[in-house]
Image: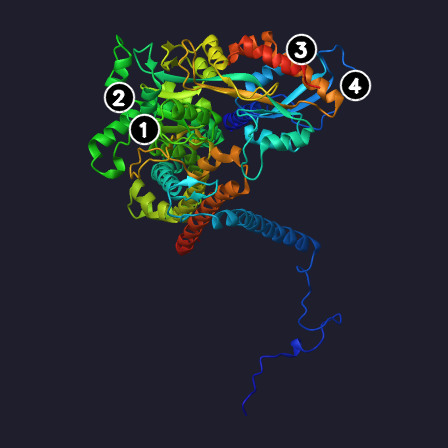
Amino acid sequence: MTPTITGRSTVDELPGPDGRSPLSGDRASTGRLGDRVFGGLAKGAGILVVGIVALVGTFLVIQAVPALLNNNVNFLTSREWVPSGTEPRFGILDMFWATTVTSIIAMVIAVPLGVAVALFITQYAPGWLRGPAAATIDLLAAVPSIVYGFWGLTIAGQFFTPVQHALSKVFGWIPVFDDAGFSAKSTLAFAGVILAIMVLPIITAISREVFQQVPTAHKEGALALGATHWEMIRTAVLPFGKPGIISASMLGLGRALGETLAVVILLSGLNSTAGWSWSVFNGGSTFASKIAGGASEFDTPQKTGAYIAAGLVLFVLTFAVNAVARIVIERRKAFSE
Amino acid sequence: MKIQRLGQVAALALVGSIAFAGCGSDNNTGSASSSSATGSAASADCFEGTLNAEGSSAQKNAFEEAASSFLAACPGGTVNYNPTGSGAGIKQFIAGQVDFAGSDSALKTEEKDGVIEADAAAKTCGSPAWNLPMVTGPIAIAYNVEGVDKLILTPAVAADIFNGKIATWNDPAIAAINPGVTLPSTAVKVFFRSDESGTTENFTKYLNTAAPDNWTADPAKVWSGKGEGKEKSAGVAEGVKSTDGGVTYVEWSYAKDNDLSIAQVDNGGGATELTAESVGKAVEAAKADGEGNDLRLKLDYTTKEAGAYPILLVTYEIVCSKNSDATKAASIKAFLKHFSSAEVQKSLEEIGYAPLPTSVQTQVATAVNALS
């Protein structure tokens, strides 16, 4: 006699004690008003934010496409910028280069510095110093960008001149460090330095939060196994915090890419006949500074469209950078519990 | 922790006060709105109501000075100016949106983009539109070279400096026209306007006309020479001020405000310093290009008249000679009479403009009187 196993029991088929249908449960935690309202609000907020980003992107594309169709040269590789007139010729190569160089310099300076400051605040600083130090770094974020621009131009710039001279004397044979004849405070390199200062508080704040989340068990375990303080940080804190550091850097990079006013004040523009130079001690215009500089002269749809097309490239660039960062973070999720 | 809480509150207060300090605006003239000139004026030269004008940003400071002195003399008579640029001002005037326009160039009589400005303006007004020169803005060649207080430049040498052919200050071309001045070997650092600018257009017009062999590029709002680009007059002035060997072209008021040395220009009639009188002489030397009361001027950039400073721009007020609205006509007449009066013109000198020379001023006053 083989018992037939069907996976069903009589409880599943007979009605419940107060006549409810089987398998309906007691509905204790589903369908309440609070859940519906909050779920709806959260969903709505998410849709709204995605919608805004999509609408901004659509606006940029709609304004830019007619102007792009009128372009007589390749938009992505041309160095000219004559967006109006009978034969518009405009391209973003110069702006792309300036934006990329300033942002990379800013990141190269700000990420190690920010992580080091965050490590100091969370791991090395005495307890009474943690709060004030954190607040002071956060104050850097409160300084308006136009103040950074003027401070850099009038005060900090003169201290960069000997640095530039030393670098171009020693490394001048590398095209990147060649002297291009611009005053030190108006170069891409110095703009990168000021951007690093503006981006530092963002990276520090987020890294600080992440390092504080490291499970004590990890840290104590490393110390128990005989690690020194630095080895403990290297093996327990930093790997745990890597996704956080990367997302902090991406936020900082987003700010550096789009920073407008400080760059407008600091950077010297190139004249229209300037040759291509790989030097970081050259002038130039980033996307944001070019658009801001031309914003008062948007008199024809053609010209407006050209500048908005440049803005669209910046939008896509930031989007791509963030997407890459997201992928990197997802792959490293293994270390978070 | 009390200290931390206190620190947070203090930081918040500091940030808040700094943030709110930015809320004020230093441009307190009202924005353009529909005008409503009410009836009876206090005297023949005053009116009560609002006038709206739009146009060139070069005359913004002068216009605001005249408008505020007019308001002081005639309380109730507000004149608003929107410095959107000469092109925008003319467009709005032709569209009948503003009472009169300010422009660095007179209404064009040739066709451009399918429109002849002078004809379109006449159509809007129902009568010919007059160009009345009102504000003279001199353009200074400002430099910052250590040890050099007096510098003389000819158009050819200036053109070579600005297109990069002359690289150091002790170049023989500069030394030849500056006998007795020790010029250092500092590099020449040119600063130009990276934004589109009427000042660039007028300066390149001068270079192109006075030194056509050295400056071959067409005059345009966009700079075609060499150098470092800075935003707006404030940017180029700051650039020159902080760079040894810097040189730029900038409005006179900015050169004065930043204590920059101003070069004397030798157009062929001897070295001329930039003063109100020398600029006035250049305006007098201009040819009258219009008929009757339409006082468009053709500036002579190659003038060899002694004591005339040739690099300048003249801003016109573009008005209807006969306005269909009688009260509006009276208001415009009252304000322009005030603006073109000798006292107001003299007061513009402090803010970096040159007053109209007497001969031109009387012509403008006559034309204003003929407005109706």
Tell me if B42 is positioned left or right of A99 in this view. right
Judged from this view, the residue extending furthest toward the front is B291
Alpha carbon distance from label 4 to label 2 = 64 Å
Seen from the viewer's position, the closer of residues B371 and A288 is: B371
Q: Which residue is mark 2?
A: B168
- Mark 1 and mark 2 in contact? Answer it, CB < 8 Å: no
* Chain on which label 4 sits: B
On the image, which quarter does residue A299 sit in? top right
| Corner quadrant of residue B242 | top left
The label number, if any, that marks residue A182 in the structure image? 1
Q: Which residue is mark 3?
A: B72
Under circle 1, the secondary element is loop
Residue under label 4 = B39
Q: Amino acid at mark 2?
A: Thr
- Going from N to C along the chain, the mark reached first, 2 or 3, is 3
Under mark 1, the amino acid is Phe
Q: Is residue A259 above or below residue B179?
A: below
Marks 1 and 3 share the same chain? no
Quadrant assignment, res A283: top left
